[in-house]
Image (cartoon, helix red, strand yellow):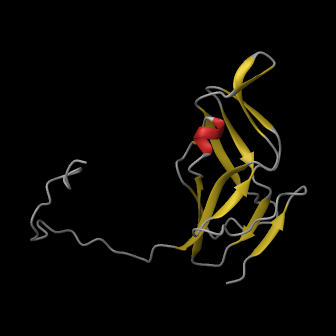
Amino acid sequence: MRIKIKYFDNATKLKKIVKGNWIDVYSNKDVFVEEGTRAMIPLGFALELPKGWEGHLAPRSSTFKTWGIIQTNSVGVVDDTYIGDNDQWHMPIYCLQGKEESEGKKGTWIKYGDKIGQFRIMEVMPEIEFEEVESFGNEDRGGFGSTGKK
């Protein structure tokens, strides 16, 4: 599959990671995020996703450990209509644990080129219709966390 990509402001070029099925994304500018605040980190690219496909943006496993940030919406979903020339992808973050200081404020620096997230594309969910029933006719499993402890 070929996907058109547009880069902004000398952005870090994207490539698929060697192990796994995700593509790393990089900050496209230096941003200081004060602890307890949020920011939109520009990722430096726009994609023309094929119709029927969407992008799922998530933090890397090391994102919190390295910068003390979390992605505010857990997983970002970019649909196939966000394909304009200026529709640059961003990662919405919240600084939960500042790692350094700037101008006397605790927070964390996200620097140009920092590998802060990852994405993959997936086919969109097919059209569905709900059929309302009184019973499924199946045995109950036992609720959330019912597969055992440890």
Which residue sits at x=42%, y=77%?
Answer: 127
Is residue 87 toward the left or the right of residue 49 in the image?
Answer: right
Q: Relative to residue 37, is residue 125 depicted above or below?
A: below
| Quarter the N terminus occupies | bottom right
Which residue sits at x=11%, y=67%?
Answer: 135
Q: Relative to residue 35, is residue 71 depicted above or below?
A: below
Is residue 22 toward the left or the right of residue 4 in the image?
Answer: left
Return the x and y of residue 35 as percentages of the image width and height.
64, 26
Q: Relative to residue 70, is residue 133 depicted above or below?
A: below
Q: Nearer the viewer, residue 11 or 55?
A: 11
Return the x and y of residue 106 as percentages of the image width and height.
69, 21
Which residue sits at x=78%, y=37%?
Answer: 31
Which residue sits at x=70%, y=43%?
Answer: 40
The residue furthest bottom is: 1
Is residue 81 toward the left or the right of residue 14 in the image?
Answer: left
Return the x and y of residue 90 as percentages of the image width and height.
71, 51
Is residue 1 toward the left or the right of residue 132 in the image?
Answer: right
